[in-house]
Image: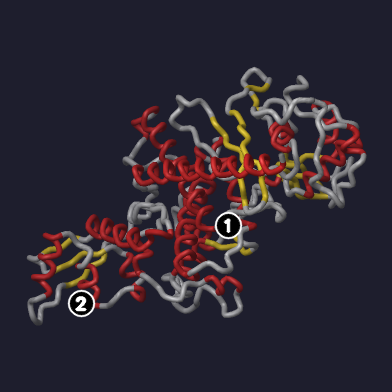
Amino acid sequence: MTEESVNRTSVDSLSNTDSRTEPYNTISRTVSSPIPLESTTPSSSGGFSSSPSLKRTRHIIGEQVVPDFTVEGNTNNNNTIKDLEPQLEPFPGFIEIYSSLRSPIDGLKVADRRRMLKTYSKCFTGTEAIDWMTKKLELSREQAQDLGQRLISAGIIQPVFGSDSFCEGEAFFRFQEDDDSNVLNLKRIWDPSLPTRHPCDLSRELLTKIALLCENYRIQLAADRPQDILSPYEFDYRKLNETEEFRQYSVATAELQGICLSGLSEKERLVFFINIYNALCLHAHITHGPPTSFFKRWIFFRSLCYRIAGIDFSLDDIEHGILRCNRFPPSLRFMRQFRSDDPKTRYMLSNIDGRIHFVISAGTRSDPPIRILEEECVEEELHFATEEFLNQSVRISKEQNEVILPKIFSWYSDDFPCSSSLLRWVQQYLYSDASKLLETMLQVKDRIPNIRYENFDWRSEARFNSAIVRRKRKRMERERQMQLQSGHILIEEEKSVDK
């Protein structure tokens, strides 16, 4: 491996640094050039290629200028996913070092280990890691041990067995992103010293990224193997779990651990939690596959979660606890989602809006398409989402004096008006012909239309309006570019003042 492939760590910088008190001090490089604009990613030949590349810009967050990394691939590849959020380094040089450690060709090898009749999955020993660092990064064993401790302090690797600190020997360690946890955004532990974005901005960008990733993957799959596609929107979620783009998304969700939810308005909480619900649901489908039985659905909705502001939120927590103001889940009519002393109650909405059920999606064929909300136009989004879903799913039969409604109205009857009032509520969202037909039926005295609920189809189907997703993507890219430009202007002004 050449000196240009990996930015090696200087002997002096590691030996003179106390990692216990300054875990993120600068790691100097023997390379005299600035931080390279290209990341070290493994190539098929065993070396390192410059694609995808890692471009570094500067981004203003509050009064702090921080590095902002954008991953780019071949511009001719329609499936390229660009990182919108800043990928902040726990310490300088982390990106290059970590890329080398995780290289599938000559990176640090991980394997299942046994100790005292127990199996520890995807681990490596301290000695193996130090041997690798001394060989590949050309560090001394003392420097390698210090680097390993920095990776633990940054939440990149975790002790598993034998020692709480990084050391030589047969103690087991594991990369954080290899940890099998029901908390899906723990592929990296977020450093609390790093700045975070506004929760609504972060939720919108995460959902847009995973929705676009899914859509591009579906398009690619449809082109490669059209005979495998059962519907225009269906694909094998678990195959996506093996891609580098999804791994990048999983690491990006770590920022949710450090955000602050206090001070959000009612509208902002609504937007944030709806976007995060949809992102978490897609994430869970990709990592665990669609829930195909009652037991799997129980685990899927009640156990898989994101850690947000230090608290674990499951899909049921978000839907029934936050968005439905702690009402009873349909499967547990005798128990509210949150206890009175649950810290999540502080984020509950104060009023329930039944239209939330038409903007959240569990990824099934009977669910509405996924939508990406923004706080500036949340009322319009709720209205149009309700209008679109009801006009596609409500069926009216004047001959049988019957109205067929989605199962959602039966499960969540407490969230909607009852009896004839429910039909009046539905009518206001129907298009002209259907609305007039239902109005005619409702005007007949002593003959209220019968309501029947359609069976729920649990088959997997990730649906979202591709045009909406791509418009959101382009808008965020424009906003991002404006932020970067304003950041450069601020930097230039500071330079002129200094002069």
Figure quadrant of the N terminus: top right
Residue in the picture at 31% in, 64% down: 407
- 397 with respect to 130 (left or right): left
Q: Nearer the viewer, residue 254 or 411?
A: 254
Residue 203 percent coordinates (x, y): 51, 54
Q: Is disc 1 surrounded by few (<14), some (14 to 19) or many (20+) residues within 10 Å? A: many
Q: CA distance from mark 1 to mark 2?
A: 40 Å
Question: Can residue 244 be spotted in the picture?
Answer: yes
Residue 306 shows which numbered tag?
1
Instruction: Pick whichever, 65 or 306, lies toward us.
Output: 65
**Image quarter of residue 392:** bottom left
Position of residue 418 relative to residue 218, above or below, is below
Which quadrant, please, contains the C terminus?
Answer: top right
Using the rendered view, name the quadrant where residue 452 is placed.
bottom left
User: Mark 2 falls on what kind of element?
Assistant: helix
Three-letter amino acid code of the residue under disc 2: Ser
Spot occupied by residue 129 in the image (x, y as percentages of width and height): 81, 36
Total numbered badges shown on the rendered structure: 2
* Snapshot quadrant of residue 124: top right
